[in-house]
Amino acid sequence: MQLGDQTVLVVDDEPSARDLCRKILKVQGFRVEEAESAARALEILERSLIDIVLTDVCMPGMDGMELLKIVKSRFVGTDTVIMTGFGSIPAAVEAMKLGAYDYITKPFKVDDFRRVFERLVALRDLAAENRSLREQLKTRHGYANLVGTAPKMQKVYRTILKASAKRHPVLILGESGTGKELVARAIHASSPWRDRPFVPVDCGALAPTLIESELFGHVRGAFTGATQNRQGLLASARGGTVFLDEIAELPVELQAKLLRALQEREVKPIGSNERTPMDARIIAATNQDIEAAIKRGSVRKDLYFRLNVVSIKMPPLRERKSDIAALVRYFVERHQGEEGRVAEVSSEAMARLMNYNWPGNVRELENCIQRALVLGAGPVIQTKDLPSNVLYQVGPPTEGPEISPLEEMERRAILEALRAAGGDRLRAAKMLGIGKTTIYRKLKEYRLGDEDLAKSA
Ligand SMILES: Nc1ncnc2c1ncn2[C@@H]1O[C@H](COP(=O)(O)OP(=O)(O)OP(=O)(O)O)[C@@H](O)[C@H]1O
Ligand SMILES: [Mg+2]
């Protein structure tokens, strides 16, 4: 993190003291905001993202100690440094007890002042790094809550890590069910602003007027039913992340309004002439072909450029089949709790899962496992517990053996008949309405032996 990314709020009732602090901090590369009272400081904290509060202790009205207590309890992730008059060490000690990072006694030497801030920034960086490392270590199988180690996922993780340290917009593209929302949450969770809110907004689910007021807010009387002022999500996310899901569904006029908000870092609530600052970080996602959507005119090109500073392309599951086994284990573990038993997956069932091309991606796989856990009778998930579309895939599988659906059905029918007949081939043939020679020929053709029967039993 660079110093320029960090904002210090200087709180002091003496203008000359504020001036001096501002000058030193600016030279150090901080962004600086100022407040002449604790009350004013709280207003600023409410509306913008402050990393560090530097406050004098003795001020008319609310003093620095009270301010420190409020910052500690309400603005998680914001650090505080206290300034005390010469000789008021007890106050400094008290402040440290209350959770201040450090104290500076006035009058101070510029170098001492600087060192306090250098150390604090180093500490904040380290904390941010630790958090993202911890996220990575949470699971051996992937990153944050994302399972998968295929090269395409590794690339996704690297981008998440890079993007999380900054506040640029991120655009996540990918088919439905590939984990776009999970990625958005991972970026937020590994960012220094992880304690701020994460606000998902489904742009496709709400009526245009509703979504405008959701995002931008409205003032009382702006439209029928607007009985109260309401702050929009963009303004209320206070330094957090707003996740705009299905961005291509956002009406074009609102896309223009969103673009303006992003450029000016301000929003204008419906019916208001005043602008409110907004410092939310925007992550947008769509499962549509964005280039095509731009050509069609349903996505504004300028908004696309603005959002596309960092883009993450989620691979469809069929392009990272090597992750299927790990995902299956993960979902079995995650959902079996509900069923209260430990399930395994038969090797034939696993082969089927690996062979299927998963048009609904990870979500479809998760549903499939959940269903199997509910429907399956035994401690092992069997082929029969899998949904028929997984077993009889229409169209060629993208990887694995070339089996056409009809043959696949026949093979399964034979296996099932054999199982029902307890392995008696003649009885199975009778059940299937075929002759003795046919079943022997088929068994040979499909290379079906006793071990297949045992496996699927
Ligand atoms: N890599 C992954 N590891 C573990 N679970 C995953 C992974 N990817 C997706 N999932 C799970 O699959 C489901 C769908 O993921 P998510 O909602 O993030 O997809 P999406 O891309 O946003 O889909 P849509 O476009 O339909 O909204 C969720 O339950 C999520 O937890
Ligand atoms: Mg989604």
Image (spheres, rainbow, N blue to C red):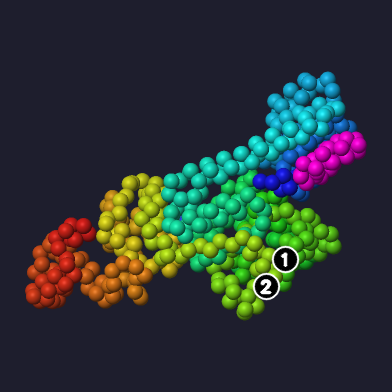
Could you tell me if the residues under marks 1 and 2 are in contact, i.e. CB atoms within 8 Å? yes
Q: Where is residue 203 in the image (x, y as percent from the top left)?
A: 63, 65
Q: Residue at x 82, y 21 (%)?
A: 88
Question: Does residue 219 appear in the picture of this structure?
Answer: no
Q: Which of 200 and 162 is in front in this view?
A: 162
Q: Does the magenta stretch include residue 175?
A: no
Q: Position of residue 423 (x, y in %)?
A: 12, 62
- Few, some or many C-alpha atoms within 10 Å of disc 1 (few <14, some 14-19, many ≥20)? some
The quarter of the rendered structure image containing the C terminus is: bottom left
Q: Which mark is residue 300?
A: 2
Q: Which of 419 and 22 is in front in this view?
A: 22
Q: Which residue is drawn at 74% across and 24% down?
A: 94
Q: Does the magenta stretch include residue 18?
A: yes
Tell me the SS state at disc 1: helix
Residue linked to disc 1 = 259
Left-right relation of 167 to 184: right
Question: What span is colored magenta in the figure?
Answer: 10-35
Q: Calculate the distance from the C-alpha at mark 1 to the C-alpha at mark 2.
A: 9 Å
Left-right relation of 200 to 278: left
Q: In which quarter of the image is residue 117?
A: top right
In this view, 403 is above or below 123: below
Tell me the SS state at disc 2: loop
Q: Quadrant of residue 163?
A: bottom right
Q: Where is residue 274 in the image (x, y as percent from the top left)?
A: 84, 59
